[in-house]
Image (spheres, coloured by chain):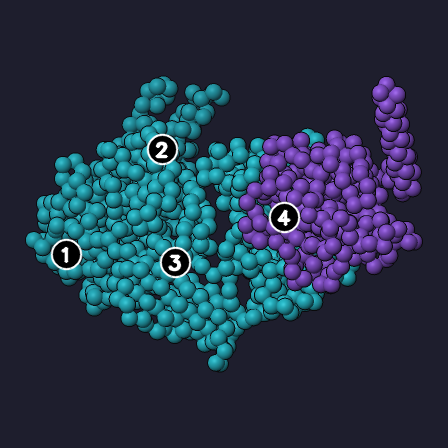
């Protein structure tokens, strides 16, 4: 219809601009329009003077406007309007047609496979229509691009789709060819995570528009799909870790199924869930014991439902590095108290946490426990960064800030901020506000704004409860089931004492509250601070849980072990190795990075860094990491992952002959897995790709229009064409409409 | 015959009367002792981190001592039951603790029983004259749970073979299978606050008039302990010595300072150990 009315396809109007071909200048046209409009006004006024009334004047104005518009429009047509647009020269340009050859195109919808629908569309419509004006080149693409004949298309079995890489390859291979346009037939399922900016830029530089044709239903058949799993990349052995499984489902609203976490063949946990439906993302937290040490690919599965069309998208793999090296925590306590004893006892039951402690027993004596050598900490709290930063965690007990020098207070702050450790401040009669910590140099690291008063510690009972954030936190997970866990907290024996910790700072998270005499205060507050994390536990009375609960009840020890592990699990060493994503889905490139710091945790810019990568083939490969410009202390190297499988990169940093540190980062290349996910048509991706290159998204039923739009392109061999607009049918219809409107109004209003 | 029976009755009545007089005299002395203590009534209700907790148990009634026979039995005050040296020894020990350490304590003692769970609020407990203690099954179970959860028990003032057997009869009811071991001089409990490698027998107040450091056949002081599965001392046994008397009579001019000094240091070490292990 559009082309019937306006002679040309929309692309001509989108890409062209209006010109007037008349010999006389435009100002003459404007002057004539004004004169004609004025003349019409005078004429109307004189002729209708006798019947002019106040109530009719606006109607006369409407009639005058219609006449003036008509006159102006006719005058414009006399000036020969045209559209100037670039057009591909017939028979001199090439249109590249790319057909998705990946496995998702083999899905059947409406009785036919997507790939068959695409081939049929090519055969019956696109190739004849395009081939009559341009040369065509046919390609199939998956993780790469291959030129084919029509007969060579199908069956679609490739395990991955890399649209961006394929387009980049096309741009390179056709750099000396006049490519006028690209037509891409696909379901939009891209297993590399999207079309990269470099691919778009390669096409835009040559002004090549990509016209995308989408195949497949936008909303899938009844299906449950695991969209993503959020899991920490590191954990300590035998730790309880938390993950969030994000899933999406269609057609199973209210149905019950189970989330299963497996380490190889071993089931780590099972959790029953109710599907929420509606196609929205459903996030399910899950907690499990990660088991022994090693790099582990964990499988997170949603148990398939009986009628699911695609069960291959119910499982995703996430890699976690479970470390066996125990972490050390320094606990400084200002006075003998029961909390100290029972924290130590909880830590003694945890082989992954070693608690070294300094206890002020008298004004002039300290008592050390958990030390590695007789001289360790012999002078009390460390004064040198290298001594304090040898620990991964720090606990400050009931000791006022004034006990520490300003340099030590600054070290406490930097322990979290620069070193990346965890600092826990406990409540007590010399803690927090009562210990004047608000005025200390470490105050910035506190996750709370302390009260102004100094009598905040009370030896009165306080009950506890979890906050919503605490219900999700692995620190507070006493039992795996979240509902049972919250109930367990509500029934815990009261704390022996409590301290008002003040208000949580913005960004801090309150995991548990305490209640005394109708007043609710935060009990456990955590926050990320700098490279590390800090927390406040505003009591010195959790020991009562251990003494009051039945013999053998693990509540107190489990809580403290989890809190202590939280404190140190993420604490980095001098070398922190990383990869952008530990799971490489159909990707063969990985960037191995390392952040290197010395014993004082200052950036080590003069280090030499190397990675030793061991893969499934067995033979290790040595890679040198180069300094990253404008990022002191960071080193990186790109590496091609030769084949699918699990890899471990051990990164070592040296300064001369001295080893600064080392770290291990595992990653896994998985081929053919991503293709099972997001099997419905990704229309958004196809629309964005078309829009960003100057093309358009088309549905299979619009292929004829697509063929007519192709000539309007600036790429390839094109010429500037002037297309007349004066003879568009729409013009005559408009003139007719104006005259009819005037006639009808005159009849209605009785104005002749 | 009738005369003989009358004489026996007379002797019995006289004995009872004498016994009551002695009893009255003991109570008078005890009251006198209480009056000589610092006035702590104002602070007795204070809340604190550490409470000197004295275990009140049911005595067997043997009441046998090296220098006489007592009247122990039940829960009453006396020289030969749970309240031996109470409360002066406790309060003087607390004064020393306050002066020499950073422990925040209440200046008065706390009596704890085994017939309620309140004992679990006091993770350190002191018991004397433990040769006389007896437990019901419920009490033994509660004390066992108390110790295995993290409580600490210090026992003192029992002497000789017979006392040991009676102490162990009660202890076996509480911890049937845990061995009692001799503590070496290197044990952490003797170094946690003061270095106490050199120790000696600490006698009771009887030393002042008898000159003997031992009582009954308890000639050699024994520093013994029962440990938990992790090797931590949960019962510290001061056998063949009387630390409580040394605390109580430390201000008596005739009582040697060296005994009192060692007793205080041992007591503080045991408290600090109980609060750190």
Tag 2 and tag 4, C-beta contact below 8 Å: no
Q: Which chain is cyan?
A: A
Calculate the distance from the C-alpha at mark 2 to the C-alpha at mark 3: 33 Å
Q: Position of residue B171 (x, y in %)?
A: 63, 42
Marks 3, 1: nearer the viewer = 3
Calculate the distance from the C-alpha at mark 3 to the C-alpha at mark 1: 48 Å
Please, which chain is the residue tagged with disc 3 on? A
Q: Residue at x 91, y 54 (%)?
A: B254
Quadrant hosting residue A95: bottom left
In what quadrant of the picture does the C terminus of chain A appear? top left
Q: Disc 2 on helix, strand or loop?
A: loop
Calculate the distance from the C-alpha at mark 4 to the C-alpha at mark 1: 84 Å
Name the residue carrying label 1. A138
Q: In this rendering, do the residues under marks 2 and 4 share a single chain?
A: no
Name the residue carrying label 2. A275
Q: In this rendering, do the residues under marks 4 and 1 share a single chain?
A: no
Tag 2 and tag 3, C-beta contact below 8 Å: no
Marks 2, 3: nearer the viewer = 3
Q: Colour of chain B?
A: purple
Q: Disc 3 on helix, strand or loop?
A: strand
Label count reads 4
Mark sitting on residue A294: 3
Mark sitting on residue B130: none
Q: Residue at x 21, y 68 (%)?
A: A176
Name the residue carrying label 4. B234
Q: Position of residue A568 (x, y in %)?
A: 53, 56
Marks 3, 4: nearer the viewer = 4
């Amino acid at each position: 219809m559009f082309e019937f009315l306006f002679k040309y396809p929309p692309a001509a109007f989108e890409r062209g601009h209006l010109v007037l071909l008349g010999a006389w200048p435009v100002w003459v046209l404007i002057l004539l329009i004004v004169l004609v409009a004025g003349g019409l006004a005078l004429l109307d006024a004189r002729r209708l003077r006798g019947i002019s009334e106040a109530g009719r004047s606006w109607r006369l104005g409407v009639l005058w406007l219609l006449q003036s518009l008509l006159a102006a429009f006719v005058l414009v047509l006399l000036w020969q309007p045209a559209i100037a647009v670039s057009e591909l020269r017939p028979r001199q340009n090439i249109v590249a047609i790319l057909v998705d050859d990946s496995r998702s195109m083999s899905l059947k919808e409406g009785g036919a496979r997507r790939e068959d629908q695409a081939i049929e569309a090519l055969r019956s419509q696109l190739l004849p229509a395009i081939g009559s004006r341009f040369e065509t080149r046919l390609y199939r693409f998956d993780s790469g691009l291959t030129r084919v004949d029509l007969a060579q298309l199908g069956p679609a079995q490739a395990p991955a789709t890399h649209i961006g890489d394929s387009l980049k390859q096309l741009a390179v291979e056709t750099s000396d060819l006049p490519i006028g346009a690209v037509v891409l037939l696909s379901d939009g399922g891209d297993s590399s995570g999207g079309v990269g900016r470099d691919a778009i830029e390669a096409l835009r530089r040559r002004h090549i528009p990509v016209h995308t044709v989408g195949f497949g239903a936008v909303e899938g058949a009844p299906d449950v799909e695991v969209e993503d799993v959020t899991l920490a990349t590191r954990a300590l052995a035998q730790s309880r870790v938390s993950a969030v499984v994000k899933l999406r489902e269609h057609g199973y609203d209210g149905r019950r199924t189970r989330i299963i976490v497996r380490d190889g063949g071993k089931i780590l946990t099972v959790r029953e869930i109710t599907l929420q439906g509606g196609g929205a993302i459903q996030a399910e937290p899950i907690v499990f014991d990660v088991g022994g040490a090693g790099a582990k690919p964990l499988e997170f599965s949603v148990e398939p439902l009986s009628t699911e069309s695609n069960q291959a998208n119910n499982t995703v793999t996430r890699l976690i590095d479970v470390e066996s090296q125990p972490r050390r925590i320094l606990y400084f306590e200002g006075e003998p108290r029961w909390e100290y004893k029972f924290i130590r006892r909880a830590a003694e039951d945890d082989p992954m946490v070693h608690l070294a402690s300094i206890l002020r027993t008298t004004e002039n004596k300290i008592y050390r426990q958990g030390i590695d050598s007789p001289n360790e900490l012999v002078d009390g709290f460390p004064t040198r960064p290298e001594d304090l930063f040898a620990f991964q965690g720090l606990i400050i007990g009931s000791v006022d800030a004034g006990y520490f020098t300003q340099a030590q207070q600054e070290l406490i702050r930097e322990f979290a901020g620069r070193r990346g450790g965890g600092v826990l401040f406990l409540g007590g009669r010399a803690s927090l506000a009562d210990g004047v910590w608000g005025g200390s140099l470490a105050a910035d690291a506190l996750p709370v704004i302390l009260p102004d008063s100094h009598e905040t510690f009370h030896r009165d009972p306080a009950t506890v409860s979890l906050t919503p954030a605490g219900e999700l936190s692995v620190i507070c997970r006493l039992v795996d089931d979240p509902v049972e866990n919250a109930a367990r907290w509500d029934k815990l024996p009261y704390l022996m004492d409590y301290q008002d910790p003040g208000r949580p700072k913005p960004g801090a998270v309150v995991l548990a509250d305490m209640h005394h005499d109708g007043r609710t205060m935060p009990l456990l507050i955590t926050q990320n601070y700098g490279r590390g994390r800090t927390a406040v536990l505003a009591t010195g009375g959790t020991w009562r849980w251990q003494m009051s609960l039945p013999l053998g009840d693990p509540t107190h020890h489990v809580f403290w072990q989890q809190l202590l592990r939280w404190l140190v699990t993420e604490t980095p060493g001098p070398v922190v190795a990383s990869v952008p994503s530990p799971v490489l889905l159909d990707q063969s490139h990985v960037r191995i990075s390392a952040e290197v710091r010395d014993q004082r945790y200052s950036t080590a810019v003069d280090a030499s860094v190397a990675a030793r990568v061991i893969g499934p083939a067995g033979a290790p490969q040595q890679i040198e990491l180069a300094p990253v410009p404008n990022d002191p202390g960071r080193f990186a190297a790109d590496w091609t992952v030769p084949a699918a499988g699990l890899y471990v990169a051990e990164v070592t940093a040296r300064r001369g002959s001295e080893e600064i540190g080392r770290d291990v980062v595992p990653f896994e290349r998985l081929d053919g897995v991503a293709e099972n996910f997001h099997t419905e048509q990704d229309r958004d991706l196809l629309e964005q790709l078309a829009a960003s290159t100057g093309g358009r998204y088309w549905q299979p039923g619009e292929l004829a229009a697509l063929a007519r739009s192709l000539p309007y392109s600036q790429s390839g061999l094109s010429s500037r064409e002037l297309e007349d607009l004066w003879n568009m049918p729409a013009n005559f219809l408009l003139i007719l409409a104006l005259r009819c409107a005037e006639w009808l109004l005159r009849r209605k209003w009785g104005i002749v | 015959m009738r005369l003989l029976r009358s004489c026996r009755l007379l002797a019995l009545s006289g004995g009872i009367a004498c016994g009551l007089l002695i009893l009255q005299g003991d109570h008078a002395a005890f009251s006198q002792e209480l009056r000589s203590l610092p006035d702590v009534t104002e602070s007795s209700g204070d809340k604190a981190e550490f409470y000197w907790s004295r275990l009140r148990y049911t005595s067997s009634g043997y009441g046998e001592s090296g220098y006489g026979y007592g009247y122990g039995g039940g829960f009453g005050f006396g020289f030969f039951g749970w309240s031996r040296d109470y409360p002066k020894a406790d309060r003087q020990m607390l004064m020393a603790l306050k002066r020499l350490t950073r422990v925040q304590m209440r200046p008065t003692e706390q009596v704890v029983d085994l017939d309620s769970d309140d004992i679990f609020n006091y993770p350190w407990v002191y018991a004397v004259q433990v040769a006389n203690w007896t437990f019901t099954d419920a009490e033994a179970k509660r004390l066992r749970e108390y110790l295995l959860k993290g409580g600490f028990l210090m026992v003192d003032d029992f002497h000789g073979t017979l006392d040991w057997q009676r102490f162990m009869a009660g202890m076996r009811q509480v911890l049937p299978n845990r061995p009692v071991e001799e503590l070496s001089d290197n044990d952490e409990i003797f170094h946690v606050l003061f270095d106490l490698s050199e120790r000696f027998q600490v006698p009771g107040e009887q030393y002042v008039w008898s000159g003997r450091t031992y009582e009954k056949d308890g000639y050699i002081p024994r520093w013994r302990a029962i440990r938990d599965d992790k090797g931590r001392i949960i019962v510290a046994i001061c056998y063949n010595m009387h630390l409580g008397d040394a605390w109580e009579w430390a201000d008596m001019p005739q009582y040697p300072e060296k005994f009192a000094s060692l007793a205080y240091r041992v007591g503080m070490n045991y408290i600090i150990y109980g609060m750190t292990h």
